[in-house]
Image (cartoon, helix red, strand yellow):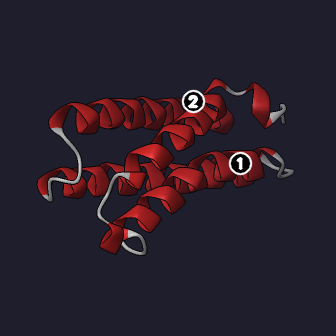
Amino acid sequence: MSNFKNLLVWQKAMKFVEEIYPLTAKFPDNEKFGLVSQLRRAAVSIPSNIAEGCERNTPKDFANFITIARGSAAEIETQISIALSLNFLDEKSAKNMLDKIVEIKKMLFGLRAKIQK
């Protein structure tokens, strides 16, 4: 397998993590162990699973970790929608983050298809 740091989807997922932390820092203090923690853990999970899968010995293992990363991306979509409905995020910020996570999901889908060939 290639070096995971060279994968554009890993790079975008890392950038997403860098953006989710300051965004969630603005959430109410009582969400520190709730939605803030969930969003951050799901965001960190994406590049982490890409990296772990890439270091596995088989394409099947790599594809499985990409699937897990896609699941984390879906969690983020849901959690951002919840944050928007609770007025923790404004419409513009939510849309920006949703657009980015949808792009990452598409890239993960493509990477998984490539791995399985």
Q: Which residue is mark 1?
A: 62
Q: Is residue 117 visible?
A: no
Q: Residues within 10 Å of mark 1 (few under 14, many from 20)?
A: many
Q: Quadrant of the C terminus?
A: top right
Helix, strand or loop under label 2: helix
Helix, strand or loop under label 1: helix
- 24 and 59: which is toward the camera: 24
Check disc 1 and give the amino acid type. Phe
Compared across the picture, whether 52 is left or right of 106 comes to: right
Name the residue: 35% across, 51% down: 26
Mark 2 vs mark 1: which is more N-terminal? 2
Q: Is residue 52 visible?
A: yes
Measured Cα–Cα span from mark 2 to mark 1: 18 Å
Q: Position of residue 75 (x, y in %)?
A: 38, 57
Name the residue: 64% across, 38% down: 116
- 46 and 91: which is toward the camera: 91
The disc label shown at residue 47, or none: none
Q: Position of residue 49 (x, y in %)?
A: 66, 53
Q: Residues within 10 Å of mark 2 (few under 14, many from 20)?
A: some
Check disc 2 and give the amino acid type. Lys
Q: Which residue is mark 2?
A: 12
Residue 93 sits in quarter = top left
Name the residue: 84% across, 32% down: 3
Q: Is residue 57 above or below residue 91?
A: below
Q: Position of residue 14 (x, y in %)?
A: 61, 38
Q: Is residue 6 above or below residue 115?
A: above
Q: Quadrant of the N terminus?
A: top right
Residue 29 sits in quarter = bottom left
Q: Position of residue 13 (x, y in %)?
A: 57, 37
- 101 and 34: which is toward the camera: 34
Q: Which is closer to the viewer, label 2 or label 1?
A: 2
Compared across the picture, whether 13 is left or right of 55 comes to: left
